[in-house]
Amino acid sequence: METHRAHLRLDVRLGERSYPIIVGSGVLDETPRHLAALQSSQVAIITHPMLQEQYGDRLRQSIEQGGIPVRQLAVPSGERTKRWEVVLRVLRWLAQHALDRRCVLIALGGGVIGDLVGFAASCYLRGVRYVQIPTTLLAQVDSSVGGKTGVNLPEGKNLVGAFHQPALVMIDIDTLQTLPRRQFRAGLAEVVKYGIIADETLWHLVRQEAQHLRVLHSERLAEIIYRCCALKAAIVSEDETEQGVRAILNFGHTVGHALEAVLGYGSLLHGEAVSIGMVAASLVGEVVGITPAGTAEQVASLLRALRLPVALPTSVELEPLLAAMQRDKKARDGQIRFVLISRIGQALLPMPVDEAKIRCALRLHRERFAEAEQ
């Protein structure tokens, strides 16, 4: 771990595709210096209208002071922006402004912007560089790191995309101060996920800090974000294209993605869906006999302490949910596969689970956790 002006730095080691992650307060102001090192000919900032006003205009001015021309595009916020029509709009905008192969795209926003801009960068001129400046907790600890990009189809989430690594990730924890508290808490679901799948120490740290974290007053926030990024960086460095261990990062996502598809994107925030999905996956593990009894209640207890949902929405029927799970990217030959845990801090690679056991786990989910959510 290296520091610069109290900033934390780590590297995702992928040979010629390696890149640094910078974490701390005031990191946004360091972006022009890092961009200069990339020797870019032009910069395009792609963000949301509100973020353009809060951070984009200031960032554009500071980059231009360094002599690099900047273009800026605002696209609508929300999960519905992650679709092919918006990708096409971004690509045509880049072409209309004649950005060349030495350009750098900046994704200024949350996971939706990061996925959208990363995918556009992978396509434009057969691939150009991009920088992630995540402004949501979920994006800071998860989606901004690792090079997964993509957009949704009506048939499912993230079904079109590419692995395209960023050139740089700049994580400024100050941007979280303008984030709605619901979105901040949704990001805490991914923090909990890292503890469950790979770091029992992080799990206990989040439990200790839960009351402070849920109101964004934890003095250990930068440390927690850095620890999550370090875990993901290590996993990505070992398995860049999700052929092995990287798949454990999908813990909670089998049911989570299915909920998003069934309810309609935007009804639940992604982190909220993953929160419910992690309780479901823990119950599936208990039913299969891999996860110790009582683990689902432990997981649900911490998620509740962070003010995250744990119950399956009453409006969701099991049959459409199972059908959506069969379309999940992890499914093989029609078999639904789950990342399960053998204990807190230890996840297993995705494995097929008999549909009868999934139904049993989902019924238990309804019985055990519905009352607590009312």
Image (spheres, helix red, strand yellow):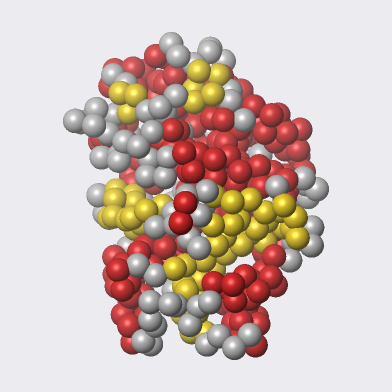
Q: Judge whether 255 appears above or below 61 on screen.
A: above
- Write the residue at 66% across / 31% down: 203
Quadrant in which the C terminus is drawn: top right
Lateral position of residue 354 relative to residue 22, left or right = left
Total numbered labels: 0
Look at 31% across and 80% down and name the residue there.
92
Left or right? Give the position of 327 relative to 252: left
Q: Quadrant of residue 296?
A: top right
Query: Which residue lies at the image location 70% right of the left edge and 72% below the top edge?
Result: 29
Residue 328: tell me if it is visible: yes
Which of the two residues, 198 or 270, is positioned nearer the viewer here? 198
Give the percent coordinates (x, y) of residue 142.
53, 48
Furthest residue in direction front, as rendered: 15
Closer to us: 248 or 174: 248
Q: On the picture, is 33 further left or further right than 120?
A: right
The picture quadrant where one finds residue 205 is: top right
Residue at 42%, 21% in the rendered image? 284
Q: Position of residue 356 (x, y in %)?
A: 29, 17
Q: Quadrant of residue 173?
A: bottom right
Q: Looking at the picture, how far across and down is residue 233, in whole percent? A: 54, 45
Q: Is residue 180 above or below residue 256?
A: below
Q: Nearer the viewer, residue 283 or 320?
A: 283
Inspect this view and state whether residue 272 appears: no
Residue 312 percent coordinates (x, y): 45, 34
